[in-house]
Image: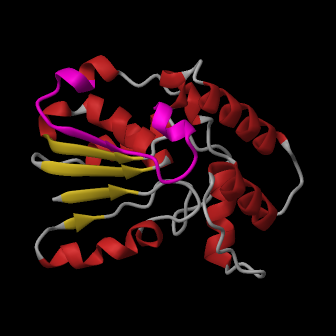
């Protein structure tokens, strides 16, 4: 089984649409993190809570793949059930707490905190500012479909992933290989 854990903004298959052909040869599980549609909205989304939820879904022999915020969730989930994983892959996890002091990380952490502190903006304006900060290319429609708006609202209430205390020692000692993919967006991700 391959479990694909989405990050912020695009939930589930919205993030992993390009991986659908893998279903020809693998069982793919793409959970929608709580707070993201089609799940009901939450007032606050917490990576620690979601790590526990994802850990419960992991079966023996699972290849766990997490993107962005889902990468932080996946790192924490992997540490909870290391004996069940066959491998762990994280793609640009914003686990910036591990790289504090790196100038690129410090700049991005400061700018992201300022961005999240602004109240009263629309989900679209939030998304445009966020993708600009992390160096992604925006493809955000002028009028948001309801599911996209709900996803953006979920992103707006996520706990700051810089606060994550990732147990890297436990992951290093675990019996599965780990792949960290970075470098596609902002240089701060290379610091992680």
Residue 132 in which image quadrant: bottom right
**How many numbered marks, from 0 up?**
0
The image shows residue 48 at horizontal and vertical percentages of 47, 33
Q: Residue at x 35, y 45 (%)?
A: 90
- Give the quadrant of the N terminus: bottom left
Q: Would residue 150 be counted in the magenta stretch?
A: no
Residue 80 in which image quadrant: top left
> Which segment did they paint magenta?
171-192
In this view, 53 is above or below 113: below
The image shows residue 138 at horizontal and vertical percentages of 66, 68
Q: Residue at x 63, y 50 (%)?
A: 134
Q: Residue at x 47, y 72 (%)?
A: 14
Q: Would residue 176 be counted in the magenta stretch?
A: yes
The image shows residue 33 at horizontal and vertical percentages of 46, 55
Residue 122 in which image quadrant: bottom right
In this view, 140 is above or below 66: below
Left or right placement of residue 51 versus residue 140 in this view: left
Left or right placement of residue 129 versus residue 161 in this view: right
Seen from the viewer's position, the closer of residues 75 and 133 is 133
In this view, 139 is above or below 132: below
Seen from the viewer's position, the closer of residues 22 and 138 is 138
Q: How is the image coloured?
A: secondary structure
Q: Residue at x 22, y 33 (%)?
A: 81
The image shows residue 118 at horizontal and vertical percentages of 86, 45
Left or right placement of residue 95 versus residue 170 in this view: right
């Amino acid at each position: 089984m391959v479990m694909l854990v989405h990050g912020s903004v695009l939930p589930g298959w919205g993030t992993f649409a390009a991986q659908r052909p893998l279903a020809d040869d693998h069982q793919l599980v793409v959970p929608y993190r709580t707070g993201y549609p089609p799940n009901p909205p939450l007032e606050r989304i917490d990576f620690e809570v979601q790590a526990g939820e994802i850990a419960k879904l992991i079966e023996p022999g699972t290849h766990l793949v997490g993107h962005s915020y889902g990468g932080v969730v996946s790192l924490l989930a992997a540490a909870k059930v290391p004996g069940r994983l066959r491998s762990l892959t994280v793609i640009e996890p914003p686990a910036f707490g591990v790289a504090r002091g790196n100038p690129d990380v410090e700049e991005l952490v400061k700018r992201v905190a300022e961005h999240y502190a602004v109240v009263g903006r629309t989900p679209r304006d939030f998304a445009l500012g966020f993708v600009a900060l992390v160096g992604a290319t925006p493809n955000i429609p002028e009028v948001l479909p309801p599911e996209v708006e709900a996803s953006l609202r979920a992103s707006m209430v996520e706990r700051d992933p810089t606060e994550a205390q990732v147990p890297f020692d436990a992951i290093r000692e675990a019996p599965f290989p780990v792949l960290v993919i970075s470098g596609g967006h902002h240089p701060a991700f290379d610091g992680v």
